Amino acid sequence: MQTAAEELLALGAEGLQLTPGNAPTEGFLEDLSRRGVPVRTHHGFDARALRTQVWSPVAECLVSSDSVHPPRDVDAASPRWHARVEAGAFRDLTLETMYPGYALGTGEALQRAMDLGLRLAVDVSHLHLQRAAERLPDSVWRRLQDYPRIDEVHVSANLGDRDAHLPLTPDTFGLAWARERLGAGVPVILECYLHRLSHDERRAQLDLLRGSP
């Protein structure tokens, strides 16, 4: 965790998203706090483990993160999760927009989420997958862009076939809107796989996100 954090902070990043998958470092969160590094925790992040379970079989959220994925359609939690959403649950959670195969993975599901006033983390790469699968109507995308309960935005690119976390390009779907949200003070998180890029390529990604010349 510490090694990955130091490499990202050396780029001039304004903060870090802490996600599952890195080997723990003793005192990691305490160190970031002492240094005043802004962080947002995501999904099954645990400072003491590679990952942890997010949803119980009865759709209880088992983590305390700033944003979480909703369950997959095949997860044991899925039927109960949908029932609980309709009953008014999870209003204090920020739920990420997903792609087909997950809750919040279609335009119809996003429409209902907005009707219910759910707090959302909008992942534009996931929305691109919905569009490629012809599951996200333009009308829902337009409504989502103006939805007032967006707590954060995630950006990366893909080819429309899988969530590949590719580097941004100038014509990446949703990038212009993400820049607008960034300018409005919404946390925007670059989620391309930076570990596959050189230091200069990583800096270029941040410049592209910020709209720097």
Image: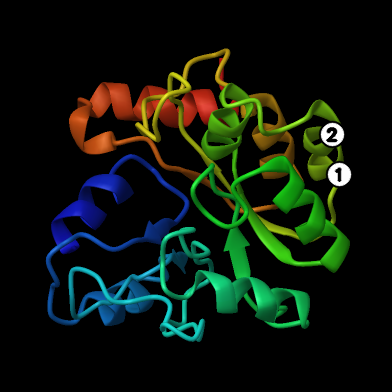
Instruction: Please name whichever residue, 29 or 121, is drawn nearer the observer in this view of the structure.
Output: 121
Whether residue 90 is visible: no
Pointer 2 and pointer 1: residues touching (CB < 8 Å)? yes
Work out whether residue 182 can be spotted: yes
| Residue type at the position of mark 2 | Arg
Q: Amino acid at mark 1?
A: Asp
> Could you say where residue 8 lies in the image, as x and y percent from the top left?
29, 46
Residue at image position (42%, 82%) is: 57
* Colouring of the image: rainbow
Camera-side residue of 39 and 43: 43
Looking at the image, is mark 2 or mark 1 nearer the viewer? 2
Residue 107: quadrant of the picture: top right
Real-space Cα separation, disc 2 to disc 1, in angstroms: 7 Å
Q: Image quarter for residue 28?
A: bottom left
Q: Secondary structure at mark 1?
A: loop
Residue at 63% x, 27% y: name it.
131
Residue occupied by mark 1: 146
Q: Residues within 10 Å of mark 1 (few under 14, many from 20)?
A: few
Q: What residue would you read off at disc 2? A: 142
Q: Secondary structure at mark 2?
A: helix
Categorize mark 2 by other alpha carbons within 10 Å: few (<14), some (14-19), many (20+): few
